[in-house]
């Protein structure tokens, strides 16, 4: 502790900090230049471009030609913008097959791209641009209509309604916690779906689900009833909806028995 107080941080940390500060000063003054452009030995391999900021980044031949990164010794105007755009385009290409054939939420695409572009693979130099590139890629996917959380919620809810009886709580959990949709967007879509003519209520869905499980037969045994209440609660139904479902099945059973007499 005394050594650190007297002599400051280790030499490597001091060097990294000074290098980072120098890089920021160059970028603020827009003075980043192309220090070297190393052409690959084999076709198809990336070019390695060294900038005066200290960053050494890999680019495809197409990227080098598009942005003039072969001009050694010349200023690289809009250096940050160029690097951000290049990385955003790579992210777009990676996301294309993921969003093309099935709808995805914004959170799912963000998670996918974050996993596909870790610093360990793209290189530390690109780490300065990943956040901005991700936002640019997401925004472009929205503009092209590939990302629309409101539309996703609408389709998801309609699909669930067609396949099985569920609760509002189930839909909220799936959209917000599993799919990553913003709560206000999910709740707006759920409210709109339940407001549609003919949309099932939680009471009706609880009844349908319980009827399917019990085949319309309930006993008065308290242990069985407690288990059925727990079953419905686990599916997100309220105590009132569970009570409605149990009562309705019991009443239907009584009506059936009376008809047999």
Image (cartoon, rainbow, N blue to C red):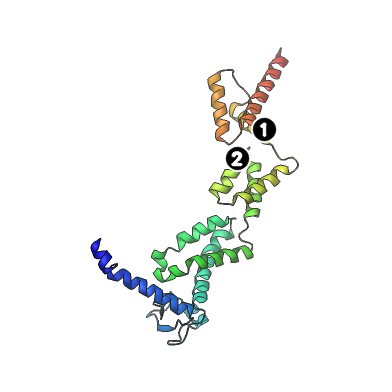
- Report the residue at 57% width, 23% height from top: 225
Q: Residue furthest top?
A: 261
**Which of these two is toward me, 150 or 53?**
53
Question: Residue 139 placed where, x, y %?
Answer: 59, 65
State which tag comes first along the sequence, 2 or 1: 2
The residue sitting at 59% across, 17% down in the picture is 220
Q: Is residue 68 left or right of residue 218?
A: left
Q: Nearer the viewer, residue 22 or 36?
A: 22
Q: Estimate the x, y position of residue 171 in percent, counting from the top left.
A: 61, 43
Quarter of the image for residue 142 reads bottom right
- Residue at image position (55%, 24%) is 226
* Mark carried by residue 61: none
Q: Is residue 6 left or right of residue 21?
A: left
The N terminus, quarter of image: bottom left
221 vs 35: above or below: above
Instruction: Quickly name the residue at label 2.
Output: 169
At horizontal 44% and vertical 70% (from top left) the residue drawn is 126
SS at mark 1 in the image: helix
Which residue appears farthest toward the left when viewing the image? 3
> Looking at the picture, does residue 238 appear above or below residue 4?
above
Find numbered disc 2 in the image and state the secondary structure of the residue it sits on: helix
Which residue in the protein does label 1 denote?
A: 203
Q: Report if the CB atoms under discs 2 and 1 are less than 8 Å apart.
A: no
């Amino acid at each position: 502790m005394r050594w650190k107080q007297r002599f400051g941080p280790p030499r490597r940390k001091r060097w990294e900090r000074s290098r980072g500060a120098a890089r920021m000063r160059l970028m603020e003054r827009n003075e980043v230049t192309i220090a070297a452009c190393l052409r690959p030995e084999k076709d198809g391999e990336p070019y390695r471009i060294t900038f005066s900021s200290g960053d050494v980044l890999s680019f495809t031949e197409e990227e080098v030609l598009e942005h003039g990164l072969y001009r050694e010794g010349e200023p690289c105007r809009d250096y940050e913008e160029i690097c951000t755009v290049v990385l955003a385009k790579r992210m777009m290409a990676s996301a294309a097959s993921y969003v093309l054939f099935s709808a995805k939420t914004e959170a799912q695409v963000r998670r996918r791209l974050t996993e596909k572009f870790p610093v360990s693979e793209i290189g530390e130099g690109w780490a300065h641009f990943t956040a901005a590139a991700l936002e640019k890629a997401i925004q472009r996917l929205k503009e092209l209509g590939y990302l629309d959380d409101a539309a996703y919620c609408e389709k998801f809810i309609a699909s669930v309604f067609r396949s099985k009886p569920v609760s509002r709580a189930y839909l909220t959990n799936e959209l917000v916690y599993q799919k990553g949709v913003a709560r206000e967007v999910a709740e707006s879509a759920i409210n709109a779906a339940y407001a549609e003519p003919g949309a099932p209520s939680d009471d009706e869905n609880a009844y349908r689900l319980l009827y399917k499980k019990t085949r319309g037969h309930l006993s008065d045994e308290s242990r069985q009833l407690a288990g059925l209440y727990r079953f419905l609660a686990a599916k997100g139904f309220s105590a009132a909806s569970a009570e409605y479902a149990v009562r309705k099945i019991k009443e239907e059973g009584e009506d059936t028995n009376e008809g047999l007499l």
